[in-house]
Image (cartoon, rainbow, N blue to C red):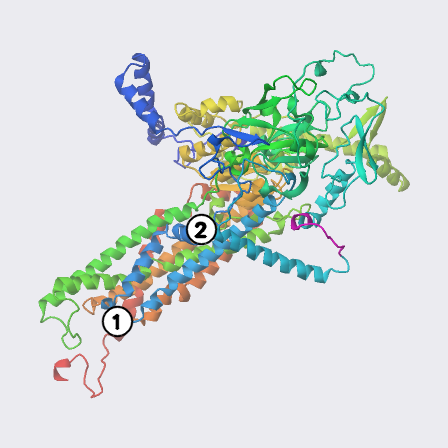
Amino acid sequence: MAVSPYTEAGDTSKPVKRIRWATQRVTGRKASQKRKSLFARHGSKRVADEKKRESDGTDPDLQKSETDGGDEEEEKPAGRSIYVNIPLPDSARDEDGKPKQNFKRNKIRTAKYTPISFVPKNLWLQFHNVANIYFLFVVILSFFSVFGVDNPGLSAVPLVVIVVVTAIKDAIEDWRRTVLDNQLNNAAVHRLVDWNNVNCAEETINPWRKFKKANTRLILALWQAWKGYRERKQKKPQNGKGYAERALDENPAEEDMVQRRMSALTDQLDAEEIGEDANGDVEMTPVPSPRRQSTVNGEAIEELDNRAPPPKDAKQSLEVPQDMKQQGKPAEAPQFKRFYGSLIDPTAETPEKARFKRDYWKNVQVGDFVRLYNDEEVPADVIVLSTSDPDGACYVETKNLDGETNLKVRNALHSGVNVKRARDCERTAFTLESEPPHANLYAYSGVVRWTQKDVKHPELPPREMAEPVGINNMLLRGCSLRNTQWIVGIVAFTGEETKIMLNSGITPSKRARISKDLNWNVIYNFIILFIMCLVSGVVEGWTWGKGDESLDFFEYGGYGSSPGMNGFITFWAAVILFQNLVPISLYISLEIIRTAQAFFIYSDSYMYYERLDYPCTPKSWNISDDLGQIEYVFSDKTGTLTQNVMEFKKCTINGTPYGEAYTEALAGMQKRQGINTDEEGARARAQIAEDRVLMLKNMRQIHDNPYLVDDELSFIAPDYVADLGGESGKEQKEACEQFMLTKNHEPPAPTHALIIDGDTLKLALDERLKQKFLLLCKECRSVLCCRVSPSQKAAVVNMVKHGLKVMTLSIGDGANDVAMIQEADVGVGIAGEEGRQAAMSSDYAIGQFRFLTRLMLVHGRWGYRRMSETIANFFYKNIVWTFCLFWYQIYTNFDISYIFDYTYVLLYNLAFSSLPVIFMGILDQDVDDKVSLAVPQLYRRGIERLEWTEVKFWTYMIDGLYQSIICFYFTYLVFEPATFNSESGRNVNDYKRM
């Protein structure tokens, strides 16, 4: 994982203008104050530690605090025991005879909502907005007739529309996550069925799940019937297969994989269950056997192989098969000297009905036997019992977990090497004592215990045997089996208890920074609203208290029994009248704008990856403006910054070079055209060499790195290097200098960098050292964290995000990057070679790393600027409208009369004045996208958060106040000299003579 700034800068010649010490250099008094405040955060703990050392740990106050803190620590979960073909002991059963331990399902969910929790959870999140709570309160007030609202139901329409539209948007967004979850949960695995797994009771399905499953089956049945009707002539019949098999067979990739596996199985295959014989057993041809199958009278019998001596017992022998020993090999081979025992009980009588069947991942349970093939992904944390390798070895690729592409060796249990077929699994009898689930990817501790019976000497008592189980015997969920034809294993952890899911965490609900800051602006409007309502209530109550001064002809008495009560009622009536001061349509308008921006991002052809047919896919639509404020980018290396592709160029065998013949073919064509290939080749080589030298020279000037070497990953055009170096103008050069990672008084030395591994990082992230480590990282130009776990990646992101109060972005392509993707303010997943787990859990999914530039510099900057202008104009137009009503109350004794029809008051924000601002927020562009990419310094305004500030907010508010005075008093002064006559022709103001 690499933490890097956007561009590298050279020597800083001028002080920068920013004063945010977190990432910029500060030359004034604020720098020292900020530094002192950072050190003061952990000063109290350091003093306590020093007191404890001086007192040798005998300080009673410290001991008391430690004791109190220890009580608050959560108890560690207990280990688990998995019983295989052994009845559960009474201590593991409850009163009903069911297992006490309820293990997690293997079904995972990255979606935020379920059909049951959607309504309450979505309402809870929506009413985190202060404005929504306010408008709910206004709607409740409207139902009291004393406040003069004629149609209270109409006042609830804007709030209902906003909540419903937002809920629909959230539902569509979360439905896309659910679809991806179902694709993973419905992946294929071969699981042992028709046997009794005592570790898991029969799952009780609640009525809601029954209803959901019934509707799902109905919809799928209708879809299959309609699809079958269309393709009846082209589609082959698939009788005898369940829905799981049909769904998997419809996938061409799965079908090809099945065909490859079939070639590795025995010739005797059943047409309905792949790899099963007449008894439901699975033959593993890569493993030599002392017996071979033959058929007599339609029944399968075992014949002795001429290559090996016959066994003494007709039943399966516990000894190593003789055909696995090479002819002439010494008997003292170390791998066969020691007898490890076998998990198979040779005396067990079984119905022999168990068989391996293709099933969904979500149906895998703790204690199940699974069979995995080459290139398959592991569905859960599995203990390896046997493999196709005679030595019990298998190879796994763990790049989804730790990003490493080199294959790792995992070994089968010595006692499980004979567990190869379904009937072998049925005859096993053992107990797996396992530690509780934890997030450490590199540690596991367990033991297998069984009773060993001696078939040769049945009179001897059975022996209690045990074999330790370590991390080298376990395949973790997310790994891929490589260079191994098959393995048989038993499931230890499923679902949320697997190590990869424990490192991932739950899907957070992210809110844009500008939305969080918006609550404060809404609170300011509440204060202004309170002052306006208070003035209206006080003046109206005071006016009614005078009695003779009111306009008796137009007033027919107050609502309250006293001037104070009348002013109280007027106060709440004014809340309803001036409700538009807090813009109810602001939030729904922002959601509409963000949805449109998400559509533009999805439709951007420049971020479309043709090879995977994958566009940039927004999964969180409400944080598009955060893309324009990112200050730190955390990137995974393997598969993200690199492609994990090894391309064959040339090799030499016995002095003869072999490689692609493009050069020779092109040279032959040029010779036919009369071109001197020698001269042209020499000229081209000289030009390429000159460009490479110029490129490296300019790159060293940018990075201040004399050790920069030429590699194909960094070979770019010299003109582009000049643009990065700021040679196109003074402004560009100064802006590039402000993108330095370390911003202290003196520029850091060119060689200041930090490389830290996972073990050291664990110590550095301790609370006593975290602040010092953060300051050390700030002093370095580059920080590289290698061999770190997913939880450590997330911890580093969390440290920078909360320690420096900056906006962060994480990008990765594997399951090991999910934790840091979810921890960052914006998470970007690459749908590449390491699966789709990162893309499923991200906020934005892209096809290649290079698309991140356009996503941030173009769409991110546009989104942040558009959102800022939209919010400012919303407050502006509401101030103009509301204060026109307020100025009118001055001439009506603040009796809360309406100068406009109530329908206009209610729909002014929602329908009449929102569309122009919404279209501005969707389509406004200050510069073209090419300019945004060519001048990345424009992005600096987002980092400094200059588009939306308190100064801008109050400027627009004051401007709206001024415009309201112009609008009201211009009209008032035009009509003020005029007179209005009644039906009798008299002036309405002369009411005493009427």
**Is 770 drawn above or below residue 989 in the view shown?**
above
* Rendering quarter of residue 235: bottom right
In reply to whether residue 236 is colored magenta, the answer given is: yes
Estimate how packed mark 1 is, as few (under 14), some (14 to 19) or many (20 or more) residues with alpha carbons within 10 Å. Answer: few
Residue lying furthest front: 459
Residue wearing tag 2: 117
Residue at the disc numbered 1:
973
**Quadrant location of the C terminus?**
bottom left
The relative height of residue 558 versus residue 962 in the rendered view (above or below) is below
Verify whether residue 729 appears in magenta: no
**Disc 1 and disc 2: Cα gap in Å?**
57 Å
Nearer to the camera, 881 or 372: 372
State the residue lying farthest toward the bottom.
984
Q: Secondary structure at mark 2?
A: loop
Residue 758: percent from left, percent from top: 52, 24
Of 570 and 237, the residue lying toward us? 237
User: Camera-side residue: 596 or 877?
Assistant: 596
* Residue at x 29%, y 23% (from the top left corner): 65
What span is colored magenta in the figure? 235-245
